[in-house]
Structure formats: structure tokens, C-alpha cells
Amino acid sequence: MIMFDIAISPITEALKEKIEELRKEFLRLYTQKDKMLSIERDDLYIRYIETIGRDKYENFCLSIEVRALKMKCELEELKDTYTKRLQLLIEM
């Protein structure tokens, strides 16, 4: 059997080269994805949890401070009303 050289147009050659470039790019991205899933994901997850955990803890501490301030305000108001009532009773 005799092999004949097939004449390929320049457009077809350019498309083949483009396909080969895209295959290489796909393989590079696929291996990069695997690397990110196996190695970098854990690091990012830990950093995310640390940041979110720290923020939640700070929010919790701030909410406690707000509650304490509200209680102080309520106690001061009760103290004021109590002293006013006491003065009214004394004046009678």
C-alpha cells in the first residue's frame, strides 16, 4: 500500500496548532486544579476558618459588651426612679 501525502490547507494547519495549544493549556489547568484541591484548599480553608472564627469571637465579645452597657443603663434608670420615689416619700 502506497501512502500519499495529503495537502493540508494553511487554515487547517493553524486550527490543528490551536487545538494542540488548547490541549496543553487544558492539561496545565487540570493539573493546577488538582494541585489546588489537594494542597492549597486545606491552607485556604484553615485561613478562612481562622478569619471567620476570629470575627465571630470578636462579634460575640462586642455583643457581651453591648449587653453589659444596656444593663448598666437600665440599672442607672432604676436607681434614678428609685431615688426620685424615695425623695417624694420623704417630702410627704
Image: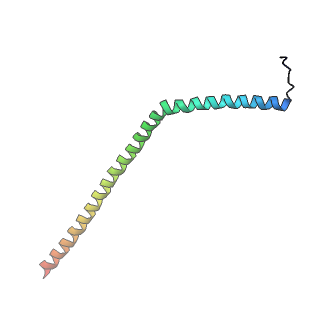
Identify the residue at horizontal 77%, vertical 29% (top origin).
Answer: 16
Identify the residue at horizontal 29%, vertical 61% (top origin).
Answer: 70
Q: Nearer the viewer, residue 79 or 23?
A: 23
Identify the residue at horizontal 84%, vertical 32% (top origin).
Answer: 11
Q: Residue furthest front?
A: 1
- Residue 59 in picture, x, y percent from top left: 36, 51
Q: Nearer the viewer, residue 10 or 84?
A: 10
- Residue 54 in picture, x, y percent from top left: 38, 43
- What is the quadrant of residue 27 in the picture? top right
Query: For this view, does 11 lie left or right of residue 39?
Result: right
* Vertical relation: 36 (above or below) 62: above
- Residue 17 in picture, x, y percent from top left: 76, 28
* Vertical relation: 61 (above or below) 23: below
Q: Residue furthest top?
A: 1
Query: For this view, does 48 lie left or right of residue 65?
Result: right
Q: Nearer the viewer, residue 44 or 38?
A: 38
